[in-house]
Image (cartoon, coloured by chain):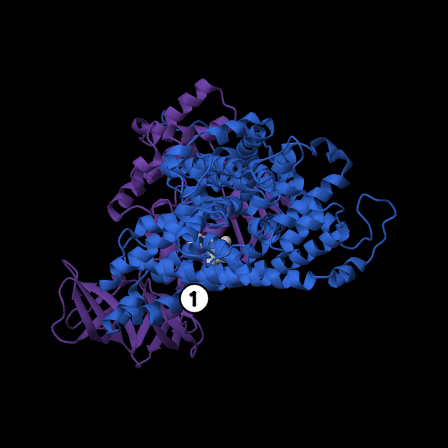
Chain colours: A blue, B purple
Amino acid sequence: MSGAALPAAGAPGARAAAHSWREAPIQYATALLTLVLVAAPLLPVLYQSVVDRPLYDAGRQLTLGNFVRLARTEGFGLVLWNTFAFAALTTLIAQVLGTLAAVLFGRTDLPAARLLGELFLWPIYLSALVLSFGWYTVYGPSGYLTMLWNAVFEEPFWDLYTLPGMAAIAGVSLAPVAYIYCMSSATITDPSLEEAARVAGAGTFRTLSRITLPLLLPAIAYSAVLNFTVALELLAIPLVFGEPAGITVLTTFLYTQGVAGIRPDHGLAATAAALMLAVVCLLVWLQGRLLGNTRRFVTLGGKATRPRPFRLGRLRWPLFALAALYILATVVAPIGVLVLRAFASFLSPMVPLSEVLSLANFAQLFAEPIYSRAVWNSLVVSAVGGALATALIAMIAVIVHRSDFRFREPLHYAALFPRAVPGVVAGIGFFYAIALMPGLGEIRNTIWVLVIAFTMRFIPTGFGAVAPMLLQVSPDLDRAARVQGADWWTTCRRVVLPLMRPALLACYTILFISFFKEYTTAIFLFAPGSEVIGTALLHLWIQGEAGLVAALAAIQVGVIAACVAAARAAFGVRLHG
Amino acid sequence: MAELVIENLTKRFGEVLAVDSVSLHVAEGEFVTLLGPSGCGKSTTLAAIAGLDRPDGGRIRIGGTVCFDDRSGTFLPPEARNCGLVFQSYALWPHMTVFDNVVFPLTLRKVPAAERRRRVEEVLALVEMEAYADRYPHQLSGGQQQRVALARTLVYRPAILLLDEPLSNLDAKLRDRARAWLAELRTRLGLTTIYVTHDQIEALSLSDRIVVMNRGRVAQVGPPQEVYERPADPFVADFIGTTNFLPGRVVETADARALVALGDGQRVAVRTARPPAPGARVTLAYRPEQIRIAEAGEMPAGAGSVVAARVASRAYVGGRWQLGLDLGGSPLRLETAAPPAGDRLRLWLPADGAILFQGSTDVSLV
Ligand SMILES: Nc1ncnc2c1ncn2[C@@H]1O[C@H](COP(=O)(O)OP(=O)(O)O)[C@@H](O)[C@H]1O
Ligand SMILES: [Mg+2]
């Protein structure tokens, strides 16, 4: 029997080599990197807002003069009003559309509800810039539908170059957010309360209005604050449609004052940016409060039981026609016509399509080195930058959730803080930071500036994809490795990170897509040689090259569509929410 | 193999005092069980020994190594303690095969590849899992996972072995088999072992000594038989084995004997080393197997007392009857082969073996 018994305990030397010293440097380095990344754009903005001349000039004096000047700037009141009106109207439209879609696609026997729901989500995969061009191609002054309408009726009843017009585009592109939150709400996944009402004799529409909608309210309220925040930060739609019509909002004000003007007024721009930062911080704080209240109403993961859908009865087909028309008008047409435009020399309802089909746009696009470089840069920034950012986010996640690092709470806070930093503010901030830091001159005109700025912007997005999965990995698994002699870092490398592989893959895909479509930060930071698709799109747009804009946009749509499809096929993740 | 010394170990979670001044000396090669109800601080104690949680106070020494000392601020991380811990959840790494799971601690210790393979095979043979080396944990049954978890811990010859309710995830039949297997293994290995369980049968059958814990404190330490036969307080008496409690008042004492009046005035004699003064409130504790129905005409004698009780309930449990009795207002449980005819009966309570606790303990709390 003793033959099978284990020999006596190993000598002390057989003990695992203690590498515990590695733990602290890795954790401090990650925390420091995160802190620098998050603070880099913020400190220069805040500092610039309280000095009397550009940051790079000597003899700066601390002053509150910028705030006074901003308040006295002619038309700034109107800018604030426009910003508020645009954001509020956008939110209203997004919430109404999102809620209706959630109830209609999620809870009724509408034909093809799943397909319609999928299509409804499409706008969030694309950049607002591309959507703007899509809308322009269909509904703009010389848009496809506008011309068709002109031929049949008279003046079209729409005008995108107005606040309501802009809000309509923005509302449609943000409605998926409201939709997603409503779809994950308890009422959609757990219909028992509704069924109780129906058993009690309430009719379909009475149940909907008295039970379903009130139960959706927390989800609607939370996504409303979320959408309001995003609408405040939106640059593309006001830039494309607002500027030509003289409608300025805060983001376009920052853009024109901060970089695009002939003589940028840095004091004013930074002060406006600081103001915006404060407002968004407040809104993000409000989101946190609301989410605390929403959790009770949201069932995560959903139930396996398929709730019994409402019967629409005679309204089934009319409602289907309405929903299909909506999807056609707001999703399929803008994207489809834009892509079509890319493959046509000219697009008009009066000219048969077969006569204008050509690849000339793409040929011209790639003939210009600057545009092929933009596509290449976008791919590199997304592929390499996305990988670097995923690595950083993985490190932050294991430190925050799987270590006893002393500053893990502050690190968690810092990692989530970029949610409160609008893209334009981050753009201006990094612009200043690079101008200020002597050592950064090297990377100023390279795509690595963009990688750094994009990483900072999207740490919270990636973290949101990684953290929930990490929390599902039982802590016993890493505790077991620790007890057996693995130090913290070995445990992370050999046990925790391999177990998180699906989440990291999802994180990478989300970051790839986010980096690929990002333009807001980029237009403040790019230089000749470091153009990306977003900046090239704006450049072409200003030159009025509609065909080339469409071709470049089509490339972005194509790459993102391929990514989304591949991600779904590979690991069935949902790339939103 | 090493001894383990714990002194005044204390751990709080916010307001909760999870472990409260626990002291314990486990000799080299000894098998000690921490026994107590769920939430009494067993796992917290184990985690403190393994170094997974930093205690708030006290000292822990494993062999010659001081692992934790609040006075000097010493705190060794888990990887420096060379403990082996088998988790209640087994914590097998789902992305590694059985072989990879077991070889991991050897890789960490930079054991040469050939010896690694030999030792993994040896330990898998020890737990009778050599045929499963290439399987993944989710392809194993609960009992097999438990053996792999044990193998993964034994393979690196830890200084002490810590087992946290290793059988609690197995179904009843498997648990009996695994317990017998574990008992055999432990005599073979002779490792210093701390075994955590809430199951008294496991504790009684496996241990050299049992540490009964209650709300973060040590209630009693002793060999199984002593803890069972001479529980230190009503909590221990109740937790280990079913116990009937009868509150009463001492009316008379003689050398090493006390006469106790129950709630309804009936008198019971018990033998006890140091009888309390007459008038003191006491609680008598009897194991169900100590009590029996008195034979017809049996009268109180020096060896025991006879009392009258009322039958409150009866249930047939296969071969025996379980009776619920009422004795002077206190509930009493009793098993018997033949049920009594009426609803009144006479009980025989032995004077020896009954335990007398001071005070009228509210046993419903335990
Ligand atoms: N991480 C923790 N945070 C807060 N309280 C805890 C934590 N772990 C254990 N406790 C509390 O400490 C007490 C002891 O827990 P534990 O040691 O797990 O009990 P046992 O293993 O004996 O069932 C319980 O009251 C439990 O609620
Ligand atoms: Mg426990």
Residue at far right of view:
A59
Q: Is residue A567 visible?
A: yes
Q: Please name whichever residue, A183 or A375, is drawn nearer the observer in this view of the structure.
A: A375
Q: Few, some or many C-alpha atoms within 10 Å of disc 1 (few <14, some 14-19, many ≥20)?
A: some
Horizontally, residue A564 falls left or right of residue A61, namely left
**Image location (x, y in percent) of residue B248:** 36, 76
**Image location (x, y in percent) of residue B165:** 38, 47
Quadrant in which residue B238 is drawn: bottom left
Quadrant in which residue A35 is drawn: top right
Name the residue: 44% across, 27% down: A7
From what the image shows, is residue A468 above or below residue A213? above
Residue at far top of view:
B114
Horizontally, residue A361 falls left or right of residue A427, namely left
From what the image shows, is residue B268 above or below residue A278? below
**Image location (x, y in percent) of residue A531:** 61, 34
Amino acid residing under circle 1? Leu
Q: Please name whichever residue, A76 or A228, is drawn nearer the observer in this view of the structure.
A: A76
Q: Chain of mark 1?
A: A
Quadrant in which residue B265 is drawn: bottom left
Q: Is residue B212 visible?
A: no
**Image location (x, y in percent) of residue A32:** 67, 42
For disc 1, the marked residue is A217
